Amino acid sequence: MRPGEVPAGGGSRREARWSSESSGFNEPSGFNESDEPNERSDGREDGPGANGPEADGLGANGPKADGSEANGLGAKGPGVNGPEAEGPKADGLGASGPGANGQGGPGADGPGAGGRGARGGGGGAAGGRARRLRRGRGTPTLRWYTNPDDGGQAKLAAECTRASGGRYKIETSVLPIDATAQREQLVRRLAAKDSGLDIMSLDPVFVAEAANAGFLRAFPPNEAEQFTRGVFPPAVRNSTWEGKLYAAPFWANTQILWYRKSVAKKAGVDPSAPGFTWDKLIDAALRSGTTVGAQGNKYEGYMVWVNALIASAGGQIIGSAEKGDDATIGIDSSAGHRAAQVISRLARSRAASPTLSTDIEEQARSLLNGPRGGFMVNWGYIWRAENGDAEDGVIDKRIPADLGWARYPAVDPGRPSKPPFGGIELGIGAYGKYRDTLAVEAVRCVTSTPNMKKYMIDSGNPAARAEVFDDPEIVKEFPMAGLIRDSINAAAPRPITPYYTDVSGAVQSRWHPPASVDAGTPHRSGTFIRQVLRDQALL
C-alpha cells in the first residue's frame, strides 16, 4: 500500500507511487479511452457486474464476482480469465453457463454478467452490442465511486440524475470502509487509465497524491470559484495542490470532545470552559473513575490523533512538502514532545481504555456507553449514532440525554486547540469521456448548498459550507452545529503531501502502541520519516 519512492530530484515520486508497476499490478488488456463510455477495446462493455457494486467497485480489475481477491489488475487473474470465469461465479453465470447463449437472459444482458462474458466472448460481446443498439446514443452514464455511508450519496446521485433532465445519469459503486483500502482500489483503476471512473469520493489526505500523479482533472479558475465559495478554508487547502483545485469539497468533518454530563459534574469540571486541556481531562477521568476514549489502533485514526496534538501544541509533522525528500521534518520538536507526553500519560493511566492500542471510532463509542464511560474524542457522527442506537434499544434511552460536547481539548493552557480535519472531496478522473462536461455538472449538483444540507440531514456528516450550519433545520437536528462549524474552521489538516501514505505509515510505526510512546519517540519518528522519504528504509 505504500510503495517505495524515488528521490524528488531524480525522477518523479508520483510515477513511482502511482504507476501500475510500482503498485505491483499489471495494466489490464481491454482498457482504453474509447469514445463509448465504459467500453472495452475487445468490443465488450462493462456493465454493473464488471464495473459496479456486484464486483465491489472493481469488476474485471480487482475482486472476482464472488468477492474474493483476483490478481490485482492482471487480465489473466482468476477473476477474469481463470477458472472462475467459466463457472457460475464469473459475472453470475459465466461463459459455459446459460449466459453464453442466453438470448437476452441474465448472462447476456443481466446485472450479473454485465455483458462481459469473460472467456465466453460471444455472450458478453453480443450482450454489449445489443444494449448499444437498444439505447443508441442514449443517456450518458457517470460512475461515482463513493465511500460507504447510509445511502446518502446514492440518494444524491438519484436526485442529480433527475435534476439533469435526462442529460446524464449517475450510478454509484461503494468503496471499502477503510480509507487506505479505498485508496488501493482507486489506485488500481487510475493506474490502468480507466475511462469508467468519472467521479470519486476522496479522503482529503489522498487528493495531493492523486493530483500529483496526474490522475485528477484540475478545476480551472472559472470553475474553482463556484466550488470554493463559502467553503471552510481547511477543506479548500486539502483540495488544492500546487495552486490548483483538484477536488470539490463535499462534506467536512472534525472531532470534538464528547462526555457524559453526569460524569463531568461528578469530576467537578466544565469541559466547555476555556483552557480545558488534555491534562485536565485525564485528571477528571481519574477522579471520577472513568475513561477517556480515543483512537489508538495502528491505522489512520491514530495518525489523526497524533497530528491534532502536535498541531495543537503549535507544531507540524512536516513542512515544505513540495520539496519532496527535503521537506522539513517538524515532529522532533517541542510540539512533538508535548504530544508524546499526552499520549504516554493517558495510555499508561487508569483513564485509558484497556484496549486502547486496538480501539477505533466505534470501540471508543462503546467505551463511552459502558459502565466506566466518561469522556471521548470522536467525529461528528456520534450524535446521530447515539440517538439511533437509543431508539433501536441498543443502548439505554437515557444516554443521549446525558451526552455533552465541547471543543477538542487543548494541549497547553492559553493555546487554543487545533481539532482534526476530515471529510470527503469529490475528484473527477482524468481519463473519463465526460471529464470536462457532464462530470463537472454532476459534481456541481452534488456539492450545491441545498444538497450539502440534504446530505448532512440524511447521513449526519457535516457540510463543507459554513452557511449550512445556520439553517434552522440543521440547528434543530444537530444542537452542536455551531461547535462543529467553529471546530472545522479552526481545524488543522494532516500533512498535505503526495507522499502522505509514507509519512503516515512512518509515524504510526514509531508511535504505536500508545503505551510505548516516550520522550525519544519524536526523534525516532523524525529520523524514520526522513529515511522513508529518501528510500533508505521501508515501512
Image (cartoon, rainbow, N blue to C red):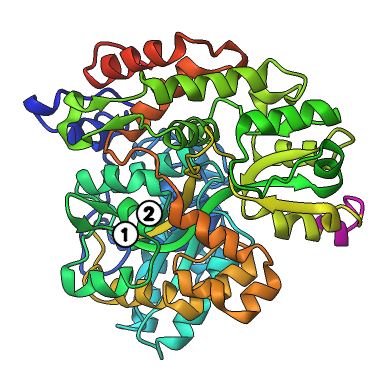
Q: Quadrant of the N terminus?
A: top left
Task: Verify whether residue 108 appears in magenta.
Answer: no
- Are there few (<14), some (14-19), or many (20+) residues within 10 Å of tag 1? many
Q: Which structural element holds mark 1? A: loop
**Where does the image place residue 418, in percent across and percent down from the top left?**
47, 43
Position of 57 relative to 114 (above/below): above
Give me the residue at 48% from left, 37% from top.
Answer: 308
Q: Amino acid at mark 1?
A: Ala
Task: Verify whether residue 390 appears in magenta.
Answer: yes
**Where does the image place residue 419, in percent across and percent down from the top left?**
50, 45
- Are there few (<14), some (14-19), or many (20+) residues within 10 Å of tag 2? many
Q: Amino acid at mark 2?
A: Pro
Name the foreground residue: 265 vs 104.
265
Residue span colored magenta: 389-396
| Circle 1 residue | 247
**Where does the image place residue 8, in percent across and percent down from the top left?**
13, 28
Q: Which structural element holds mark 2? A: helix
Whether pointer 2 and pointer 1 mark residues with C-beta atoms closer than 8 Å, the reply is: no
Compare marks 2 and 1 and give the one earlier in the sequence: 2
* Residue 288 visible, this angle: yes
Q: Is residue 121 left or right of residue 194?
A: right
Position of 106 relative to 68 (above/below): below
**Tag in front: 2 or 1:** 2
Name the foreground residue: 24 vs 285.
285
Q: Is residue 525 left or right of residue 255?
A: left
Q: Is residue 181 left or right of residue 256?
A: left
* Residue 122 visible, this angle: no
Query: Which residue is most to the left?
Result: 10
| Circle 2 residue | 234
Main SS, magenta residues: loop
What is the CA distance from the residue labelled 2 to the residue labelled 1? 13 Å
**Where does the image place residue 180, in percent across and percent down from the top left?**
46, 38
